[in-house]
Amino acid sequence: MENVTVIDHPLIRHKLSLMRRKETDTARFRLLLREISLLLGYEVTRDLALESRTIETPLAEMRAPFLAGKKLVLISILRAGNGLLEGMLDLVPTARVGHVGLYRDPETLAAVEYYFKVPEDLSDRPVIVLDPMLATGNSTIAAVARIKRAGAQRIKVLCLLAAPEGLDAFRAAHPDVPVFTAAVDERLDDHGYIVPGIGDAGDRLYGTK
């Protein structure tokens, strides 16, 4: 799919399979999501800008690469996005963090915003939006639109799983925003859940069902 990258590293595929199993308990699910988000993070941050600085090693002086420009911003779509956020912060601990609070209306499946707090000066920063499930795409579409209105210009979306229907909707709404995911599953069911999927990511992450 255009502008969609499936990161199918063997370790990611293995850990995702463990997460899919219905008998995987909350603690194990949480740990696996953190581990996978760190692995996904390597790919989604591959094009971060670098600059050379002079340093001293124990043996010699050298020009060494360091991250350049303003710090990366990670924006979690609450609440399940926080599961991806923890692993990404393990990888990039200096990143700035924002949150978008959205819930899915059970009748219309539309996204309803209830919270928004992000760092200032988004226009000069790379932004990665985090949400484990890109199902109908409504929440991710709404979150990215809101983040664009806040000034962000360089945006990527990182999710654990995506449905073809959600990807189609997202690309129609935001053709300029690349999506990175561990897998594209078969379809959505009548309730807007990804099949075969992993169930409700937030409930499994926090043990609320």
Image (spheres, rainbow, N blue to C red):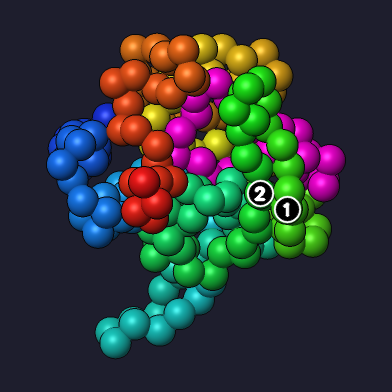
Q: Which mark is residue 56?
A: none
Residue sitting at x 34%, y 53%: 207
In the rendered structure, the answer to whether residue 35 lies left or right of residue 94 reads left
The span shown in magenta is: 128-153
The crowding category of the residue bearing disc 2, from other C-alpha atoms within 10 Å (few below 14, some 14 to 19, many at least 20), is some
**2 or 1: tag closer to the N-terminus:** 2
Please state the horizontal and vertical placement of residue 80, each as a whole percent of the image: 48, 48
Residue 115: numbered disc: 1
Whether residue 164 is visible, yes or no, is no
Q: Give me the residue at 57% from left, 50% from top.
A: 78
C-alpha span from label 2 to label 1:
4 Å
Residue drawn at (59%, 28%) of the image: 106
Q: Amino acid at mark 2?
A: Gly
Give the residue at mark 2: 101
Picture coordinates of residue 6, whole percent (x, y): 37, 26
- Of 148 and 16, nearer the camera is 16
Q: Secondary structure at mark 2?
A: strand
